[in-house]
Amino acid sequence: MLEAFRNLGRITELAMVLVRHGFADLVERLELPFTKGTGARSGGEKLAQRYSVYARLRMVAEEMGPTFVKLGQLLSQRPDLLPKGLILELTKLQDSVTPLEFNQIKKQVETSLGKPLDGVFAEFDRKCLASASLAQVHRAVRADDGVEVAVKVRKPGISRTIRADMELMATLARLLDKEVEAVAPYDLPALVKEMDHSLHQELDFALEARHMRAARANLPQGSRVIIPKPFLDLCGPRVLTMELVKGLPLDKAELLPSQKKILAKDLTELLLDQVMLKGFFHGDPHPGNLMAVTRPGEDPRLAVLDWGLVGRLSDRDRYQLCDLLMATLQGDAPAVVRTWSDMGAVPPGGGDSSLEHDVSELLEEVQGSRDEPVDTAKIILDMMEIMRLHHLKVPMQYALADKALLELESVCRALDPDYRPVEATRPYVWRLYFERWRPDTVARRAMDHLTDGLRFLQSLPRRLDTVVNQLEKGELNLQLKHHGLVPLTRAVQEGASRVTVGLIVAALILGSSMIVTTGVEPKIFGLPLLGVVGYVISGIIGLWLVWSILRSRGGRF
């Protein structure tokens, strides 16, 4: 598989980075190509003594470059699948890189828009405002109306780099899933496929422009939040032209405590309205995507940038999220597990019998601290940890909503130490609850159910006729899916292979012994040469067999 891989150099680079960070055993187990005897292994072993596995994985992503950094950031949004310690490390990944030369950016803009740069923009700053792994942003002025804009340009060649790196990650995911039993519950191939889809969404700036337009249309009436206006005539898959927002990142803006409280309130209203009421929300509202816009004599306003990654919740998704929040606040563990089942996270059999017990213990801890401020971020992370330990898989839209709410609390607590997320969320939960049971909503759902029922009845005779015809022709097939037999099958196959090799070794030894007793020529050390060669070959194969058994069993028979 690896020999046929197109980017062998990149694989070797990754293998060497892994060895330098203390993962030499994993590299050897996966049989990845790397240069031995460079001292990298001893350096990695020293590093392993100083840092945790999760910290070293973050370092690997940082050294491997933009794709791996971006992938790590996306993985940090799945606390339901990955250990809490790894999630905390991945959130430290910084998406800031050296900007490209202006000529490369100019060529990319002209190719994308199909016009010379000076025919579209009266001004275009050579120095970028910001540079990240996928793109960089330049200030410009539109030629036709003189409006000051920000132009986000996808870096040339980054799409090809990401495609190659994602092929590498897919290959590694399949290898790990096959060779390392401990990672099997994470379903790494499916996770990499999901991350690949998210990355390609972020690479499409035309899609981001549509997201921005939809978000602006969904702003609550009277909202003070700024979402830059996209200029669709100057947008495409590789270029996004939008209204220039002049402000400072939240962590760098000098604001009074009262002004910070205003921004925290504005962000809370925006995001909870998006998640709970609109079902269309910003998927990554971390501080780097938020700016404070200040004008003399006015309260600061919040600007929300980077709309490449968004989440969507259907009406059904929003109502289930409402059920989950209400069950959590009321300490109703059975209702929490039931809602998870409705969300599709719990397998059809109902999951582990200890699941409800673990949820109950967590909720008892929450209920026991009513006199103290509720740490909702901790509750969400602890719930995600329970889901991970019980191998529950949360659909992507819910995982993204959870991550957005985690970011919301983190940012708002930094702005306002007195921030109370439960009190801020409660009005929106109740609004969603009453929306769900409004007469017009109930009537619409009843009509949908009635329509579905009539369609089912309409198609039932045809379906029954198909089944009967298949029975009459003997063409009815049943598909049976087994679980947990793959490790057993692999063990049986490995055992059979070793028994076969053992029999061959025994036959070689027996045959060589018979040859030695004949005294046939030629001889070496007074023994028949053919018999000695047989002993040597059987010895080598026997030693290899012992070594392979020891390696597969961690050094134990």
Image (tube, rainbow, N blue to C red):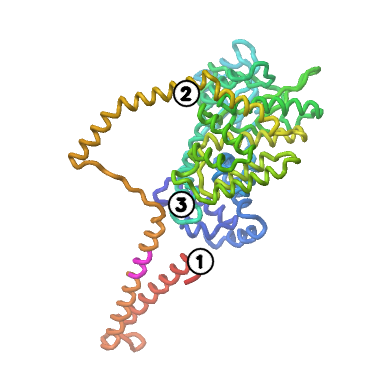
Instruction: Say whether residue 161 is visible.
Output: no
The residue nearer to you, when weighing 7 against 373, is: 373
Q: Mark 2 is on which residue type?
A: Arg
- Which residue extends farthest top? 145
Mark on residue 445? 2
Q: Which residues are magenta?
A: 494-499
Q: Earlier in the sequence, mark 1 or mark 2?
A: 2
CA gap, disc 3 and disc 2: 42 Å
Mark 2 surroundings within 10 Å by alpha-carbon count, few (fewer than 14), some (14 through 19), many (20 or more): few
Q: Mark 1 is on which residue type?
A: Gly
Mark on residue 554? 1
The percent coordinates of residue 312 (x first, y second) are 53, 29
Q: Earlier in the sequence, mark 3 or mark 1?
A: 3
Mark on residue 177? 3
Rendered residue at 62%/45% (across/down): 382
The percent coordinates of residue 373 (x first, y second) are 74, 39
Marks 1, 2: nearer the viewer: 2
* SS assignment at label 3: helix
CA gap, disc 1 and disc 2: 58 Å
Rendered residue at 63%/19% (across/down): 220
The percent coordinates of residue 84 (x first, y second) are 61, 47
